[in-house]
């Protein structure tokens, strides 16, 4: 099978290679991959900016069909359509695992960076990390279950949007637009979307198609702080920071009301970011730093996707794995929102 492999450490060093079909163990299943989503993490791995263990097949967002099952697998059978949590190799013994936070285990070696991932034709996954697709949910939309599960965990389980909340979303990327939709589903009264001039011609049109916000603020041409304060009165109840931009993080603190919540999902490009610390202290803000997804977040995400309440189809386009280099470039340069790769037929 043809696989996209990070061959060795360093910038680039990524290529399509022939790999054998993986062998599954008694508690695992073999999955024929249908679609694989390119995540920002994959781009970071390409540029040597995220931990990984080469040589490794990259990719961790997938949907597919079970084609073989191990002798001890009881909950899945051939033909099941599935997605899976990328929390492989969690130890099960540390305080994080014992408290149900396997996604944060220090020993975790997930598909796509710690062990072989989904940018290929076949993938092995343990039964315990799989979820069946709700009836009627397409395999293409299901491939976005992982980013949806991240948002469900951080926004709905942890930040807990309350009906009537005034919510600000920093960013206009896939995570931001999923968050805007989930905030609306949870009963937010007003959703303000903050982006840049470069978002107007492409990303904003997708956001408008989803009808998931009340007002767009161009932070490069408008006074975002003044507008948000005018729209919210005393400030936002919740800000979802999904851009990773230092200026957006600082603005987030300035526009939150006292005792408001900052839900930080976006990774920054720099190791440190300057923030108005004293203002955050004086406002007694709750700041939640987030990483990865929970089991219940996956269940919430799949329920919302299956019911049609959460719409991800406008977010993605589909290309062949053979086109991976152009796909990565288009994402980096803002010419695409989300790209799903299909395996190479041999």
Image (cartoon, helix red, strand yellow):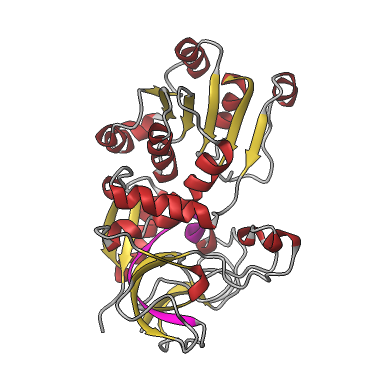
Residue toward you, 52 or 188: 188
Residue at 41 percent of width and 22 percent of height: 190
Q: Is residue 17 above or below residue 338?
A: below
Left or right: where 182 falls relative to 261: left
The secondary structure that dominates the magenta segment is strand
Residue 309 location, x and y as percent? 31, 42
User: Would residue 244 be counted in the magenta stretch?
Assistant: no
Q: Quadrant of residue 278?
A: top right
Query: Could one spot residue 7 in this view of the protein?
Result: yes
Residue at 27 percent of width and 49 percent of height: 313
Tally the numbered discs: 0
Residue at 48 percent of width and 61 percent of height: 42
User: Would residue 32 be counted in the magenta stretch?
Assistant: yes
Residue toward you, 92 or 269: 92
Q: Quadrant of residue 294?
A: bottom right
Residue 17 location, x and y as percent? 41, 81
Query: Which quadrant of the figure contains the C terminus?
Result: bottom left
Residue 238 location, x and y as percent? 54, 28
Residue 255 location, x and y as percent? 57, 20
Magenta stretch: give its range: 28-43
Q: Is residue 41 above or below residue 274?
A: below
Query: Which quadrant of the figure contains the N terminus?
Result: bottom left
Q: Is residue 145 above or below residue 28?
A: above
Query: Could one spot residue 246 in this view of the protein?
Result: no
């Amino acid at each position: 099978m043809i696989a996209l492999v990070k061959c060795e450490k360093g910038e680039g060093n990524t290529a399509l290679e022939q790999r054998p079909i993986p062998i599954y163990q008694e508690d695992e299943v073999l999955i024929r991959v249908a679609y694989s989503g390119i995540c920002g993490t994959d781009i970071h791995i390409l540029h040597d900016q995220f931990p990984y263990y080469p040589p490794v097949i990259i990719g961790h967002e997938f949907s597919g069909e079970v084609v073989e099952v191990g002798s001890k697998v009881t909950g899945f059978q051939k033909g099941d359509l599935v997605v899976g949590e990328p929390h492989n190799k969690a130890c099960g013994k540390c305080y994080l695992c014992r408290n149900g936070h396997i996604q944060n285990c220090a020993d975790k070696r997930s598909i796509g960076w710690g062990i072989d991932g989904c940018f290929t034709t076949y993938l092995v996954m343990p039964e315990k990390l799989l979820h069946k697709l709700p009836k009627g949910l397409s395999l293409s939309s299901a491939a976005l279950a992982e980013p949806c599960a991240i948002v469900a965990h951080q926004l709905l389980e942890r930040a807990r949007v309350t009906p009537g909340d005034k919510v600000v979303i920093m960013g206009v990327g896939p995570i931001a637009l999923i968050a805007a939709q989930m905030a609306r589903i949870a009963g937010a009264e007003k959703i303000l979307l903050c982006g840049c001039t470069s978002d107007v011609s492409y990303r904003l049109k997708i956001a408008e198609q989803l009808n998931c916000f009340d007002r767009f603020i161009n932070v490069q041409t408008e006074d975002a702080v003044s507008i948000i304060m005018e729209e919210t009165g005393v400030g936002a109840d919740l800000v979802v920071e999904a851009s990773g931009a230092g200026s957006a993080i600082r603005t987030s603190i300035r526009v939150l009301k006292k005792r408001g919540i900052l839900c930080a999902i976006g990774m920054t490009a720099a190791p440190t970011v300057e923030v108005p610390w004293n203002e955050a202290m004086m406002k007694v803000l709750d700041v939640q730093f987030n990483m990865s997804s929970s089991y219940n977040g996956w269940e919430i995400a799949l329920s919302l996707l299956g019911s049609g309440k959460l719409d991800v189809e406008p977010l993605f386009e589909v290309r062949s794995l053979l086109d991976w280099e152009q796909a990565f470039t288009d994402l980096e340069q803002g010419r695409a929102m989300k790209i799903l790769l299909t395996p190479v037929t041999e």
